[in-house]
Image: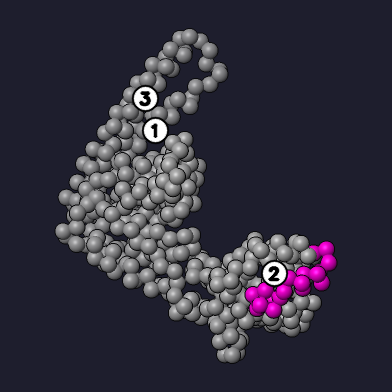
Amino acid sequence: MNPATAQLRYEDYFQGMTVVSDAPVGLTGDKLSFHRYVDPIISILTDPEQQTPFTVGVFGPWGSGKSSLLQMIHERLEKDHPERFVRVWFNPWAYRGEENLLVALLHTLRDALEQDLNKRFAESSKKIGEVLLRLGADLLLKTTTAGIVSAEALEKLEKQYLERRSIVESTMRNLHRTLQKESDKIYENGAQLVLLVDDLDRCEPDQIITLLDSIKLFLNIKHVFVFLAVDREVVHRGIQIRYDKFKFAAGRDQTVGYEYLEKMVQLPVELFPLSSAQIKDLSMVMVPGSELEHAQVREVVEKVALPNPRKIKRLLNIFAVLRALMRRDSDLEKMDPLMVLRLVALQVQYPELYWDIVRMPSGLEVLEKSYAATFKDADFQAYGNLQEPLKAFCVKYYQPGSALARIFDGSDFCRIKAQLPFYLSMLGGSGA
């Protein structure tokens, strides 16, 4: 096949289809009205009377937009105050294999100082590099191998190790003082440090608490702003794991995580769930079709989507691809796109329920009738050997008044009962 012809056919096949990335959006892609957070935060950072150290906690579940908010703050500072702030973007998850995330953070800080075009912070960058060399000396311990057998060699190695260990311990004791001294020099050169810590809640719980402890211990210094983007619940789990042996009193383990963050964070910023208007804005990225279908799809998305940007993007992306395929395949074009959309919502937002439906498709029919209040206990008898499994299924997933119930509000899965295995197969389930 001619490559040019193949390209034309590909473009024709997916013409009009748009999918969106899950990468953090900046100021130009603000579909979530995050400027309402950015503006007051920038005012705090630029207030000449603002005291430091100052830590901002950006809290929200995974996919709520924490990374996007940090990206917008980073861009605003870069655009409006490029000389006034040294922006240090640190993603600990990228260094999750490191033994000490503090060392990775200091490397990132040094790199940010070196990038100053006016070379204002060359001396501070060099000083932090020297600190890193001293901390790296502790790696000498790893050189001990079974191949060293002579008493003389062991004695020499032990002496070297103790000397290096002494240097490392001295460096750690003085690290807070050293960092404060360098922060003062940076401030004298007309700038302040802004540390933006993203994706912290993707690390192991113990790593999270260790890094937070290190930030509190060593970077709680003047002329430094710290932003922590994290899911509170992940921090709570980390605290519970770290201090499990202390056996907190009943109910105490539920509050200790909040108390831990309160000691670190002066300004907690809670990301609100998306409003219906914001969900509508996100759902404007649609697959090709008539105005009527667009309106119908947006109506369903507004009804069934959880107020989480990442899940909405995923829902729309999957549906966009499926809808494009349905339009160009004679076997698929007869499928009901709104039923496909609701099934995608189940798959993305309630994966456990979705895969239980794949294993037992009749569960979807029974659950829909239960939400519509048209199903009675006696009706289970019609399902023979599936009576008890279906009863257990309904006990687990029948949740009146919940977000899940909205997926069944106005649904018509019973109408496609005979074709349901085919629908599920299209979405990646066998339907068997």
In front: label 2 or label 3:
2
Crowding at dot 1, Cα within 10 Å, few <14 / some 14-19 / many 20+, comes out as few
Q: State the CA–CA distance, disc 2 to disc 1.
A: 51 Å
In front: 72, or 229? 229
Give the farthest residue toward the right.
384
In x, y percent, where is residue 329? 74, 80
The residue located at (48%, 27%) in the rendering is 142
Q: Disc 2 marks which residue?
A: 427
Discs 1, 3 touching: Cβ within 8 Å: no
In front: label 2 or label 1:
2
Q: Residue 174 sits in which quadrant? A: top left
The residue located at (64%, 65%) in the rendering is 397
The amino acid beneath tag 3 is Arg
- Left or right placement of residue 418 versus residue 396 in this view: right
- Please provide the residue range marked out in magenta: 369-386
Earlier along the polypeptide chain: callout 2 or callout 3? Answer: 3
In x, y percent, where is residue 311? 54, 67
Q: Disc 1 marks which residue?
A: 136
The amino acid beneath tag 2 is Leu
**Vertical comparison of 148 with 263: above or below:** above
Q: Answer yes or no: is residue 257 visible.
A: no
**Vertical comparison of 78 with 228: above or below:** below
- Left or right placement of residue 44 versus residue 420 in this view: left
Q: Secondary structure at mark 2?
A: loop
Q: State the CA–CA distance, disc 2 to disc 3.
A: 58 Å
Q: Disc 3 marks which residue?
A: 165
Earlier along the polypeptide chain: callout 2 or callout 1? Answer: 1
Label disc, if present, on residue 268 of the rendered structure: none
- Left or right placement of residue 258 versus residue 384 in this view: left
**Vertical comparison of 48 with 237: above or below:** below
Residue 158 located within the stretch drawn in magenta = no
The residue located at (79%, 77%) in the rendering is 418
